[in-house]
Amino acid sequence: MFKIVKREEMAEGTVILNEIEAPLIAEKAKPGQFVILKATETGERIPLTMAMTDPVKGTITIIYMVVGKGTAVFRDLVVGDTYQDVIGPLGKPTHLEKVGKVVCVGGGTGIAVLHPITRALKEVGNHVIAIIGARSKDLLILEDHMQAASHELHVCTDDGSYGRKGFVTEALRDVLENEKIQLVVAIGPVPMMKFLSQLTKEYNVKTIVSLNPIMVDGTGMCGGCRVTVGGLTKFACVDGPEFDGHQVDYDELMLRLQAYCEDEKKCYEDYCVLSA
Amino acid sequence: MAEKTAKKKSVPRTLMPEQEPEVRMRNFDEVPLGYTPELAQQEAARCIQCKKPGCMAGCPVDVDIPGFIKLIKEGDFKAAIRNLWAKNSLPAVCGRVCPQEIQCEGLCVLAKKGEPIAIGNLERFAADYERDHGTGELPPKLTPTGKKVAVIGSGPSGLTVAGDLIVKGHEVTVFEAFHKPGGVLVYGIPEFRLPKEIVFQEVGFLERLGVKVDCNVVVGRTVSVDELFEQGFEAVYIGVGAGLPRFLNIPGENLVGILSANEYLTRANLMKAYRFPDYDTPIPKGKNVVVLGAGNVAMDSARTAMRLGAEKVRIVYRRSRAEMPAREAEIHHAEEEEIEFFLLTNPTKFIGNERGRVIGMECLQMELGEPDESGRRRPVAVDGSEFNLDCDLAIIAVGAGANPLLTQSTEGLHLNQWGYVLADPATGKTYKKGVWAGGDIVTGQATVILAMGAGRKAADSIHDYLTYGW
């Protein structure tokens, strides 16, 4: 059993933070790795990349958007409640290297995944420019954390309610126009990663994305998380979750993410009715 | 005397009652219903108690087959299960899933002139009777040795190692990557062949004996093999299974609605997706399902699809019926449940719709040519035989390879060209001191009982090591 020691609501309650006691995982976890969580006996196994880890306290922190029944069950857990199962750390850690100037771009809850990677890239000596975005000011998460994790922070909102009006792609284009960038890390919704990768390809800048496809075991056993990268089939759980953004078949990934949408919608609606 | 023997031989094998095909093909309850004590004793009485029993030679874990059968015949069911436990920690499992026809029963002397003793059914009976009516009294354990053994993987070979070593007085911890123990017995073999409750009770039996089971630990990620030694474990057994699904590597394979059998069965069995939405994990419910491959896993997948409401389920296999690797009994059960066989058919491409979902396959008709290196006749495409086969769900059941997660994170193991761990077949010893391996991660995908046999040999060797040294 894995106890929740802290819970916060962000982005008007649509995004939840849980800090969870998991000492074995906290000790081992590296930036970019993920865990699989299952709240109850009848629950689903849900993969989430860790937003923070604290090996001293023996805790890991996940930040997720409530999108279906699985995450709604997570949302309804309070401090002191437990996750029945937490498995990890899974996936390959981020490759950390001093390359020079790096831009870390995050959208939505992708910012949570981006945060430890940004910090680590700074720690190994890169100059790190962070660009984060959300639909509006109230939906933006982890601004302070990202400020601390980077050298420069640019904030964008789709509606202009905070920071620069517009998408993160536009902010990134400006940076790429004005500075020589060695690496871009882009994490967020699949369409965002697709467009960011198209942009960085124009400028010929190496780009890393972190993918979160549908997954069951997370250890390379089921192949549910397969993605096409550079024309080859890869398993996101063991070959990833980070891949060369210029090689990923995003359209296929988006279709695969829709595989269970009807079942999931029904399951979520039933849960909302029951818990209302 | 001669007349008496002849009379004995003429007694037919006692059939185990089972659910009718038209009923069971739509439910997940176990297919065979089990013997009553009367039926079990009737079947046990057919055993002629050979002085040199052939059956035992066919058992990878050396069960005293005539011995336990005699005890059933005499009605001493408690003694029968104790006799089984002496050699087999998982009799309720083996009674159900061993390929007895090529092992013990295949060597039964009665099989020469008639039907062999139903050894598997009797083993199952003894285990089920103990579970339902037993006293729960545990078999004896030797004095504690204070030596700690780590077993990685809680499938059949790992559980065998754990069961053997705990009664020899060692401390045993089993590490399992999934959230429930049992390995392939839980994620792979369907409920209707092996109820999960039975697996959990078998594991519970080992826990009562003192085995510690630690789930949610991915050795290679959460902890490494070398760290286990640092934690004070003196011996490590690797029994992680094959666990890397093979795909066909043909165009369109990543369309929605194409799953590995591992994923399909894990969703159905471990995650209980057949009870969706009571359980949260969904599973695709195809109306027109194809299963590629013809082994036991393919049969399990096809029968699962039928139970999930398919109108049509087809096994598609590029060789002929004679080369199908599944057990005859599984093929028979599948046929009874209206699974169709599309033999000598080789898919070359999956076809999808505008939403990226599979709607069919392009196939070639095959014919059998000269034998290949496996000794089976090689399937060769018939010129101009292209045709399409519609489907809305395709399950790839063409076998599994070696999962590299643990082996690549462990220094000092030697692997063969396919990534399987090199281990001494007699002892299970690997090239790394203090580390043994067995089951599918050594042999490639095989059977539950062969994995258990490897576990038995390794457990003996580990015991020797802990007693006398490497």
Image: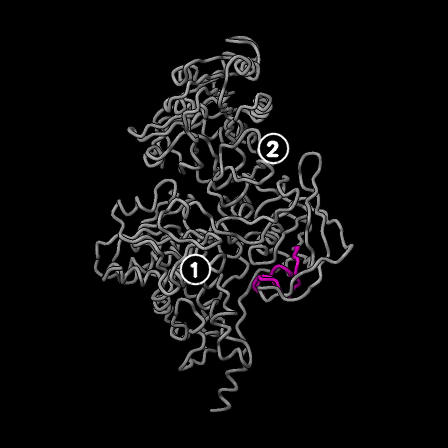
* Residue positioned 44% across, 27% down in the render: A76
**Mark number, residue B451:** 1
Q: Is residue B333 magenta?
A: yes
**Foreground residue among B207 and A55:** A55
Q: Chain of mark 2?
A: A
Q: Please say if A99 is above or below A82.
A: above
The image shows residue B145 at horizontal and vertical percentages of 21, 57
Q: Is residue A245 magenta?
A: no
Query: Mark 2 packing: few (<14 Cα in 10 Å), some, or many (20+)?
Result: some
* Residue positioned 35% across, 54% down in the render: B237
Q: Amino acid at mark 1?
A: Ala
**Mark number, residue A249:** 2
Q: Please say if B244 is above or below B94.
A: above
The image shows residue B378 at horizontal and vertical percentages of 65, 62
Residue placed furthest toward the right: B384
Q: Amino acid at mark 2?
A: Asp
**Looking at the rendering, which quadrant does residue B66 occupy?**
bottom left
Q: Is residue A86 visible?
A: no
Q: Please say if A99 is above or below A39.
A: above
Q: Name the quadrant of the N terminus of chain A.
A: top left
| Colour convention | one colour
Q: Which residues are magenta?
A: B316-335
Q: Measure how far apart labels 2 and 1 are at the Cα level.
A: 39 Å
Task: Indicate the secondary structure of the residue bearing disc 2.
Answer: loop
Q: Chain of mark 1?
A: B
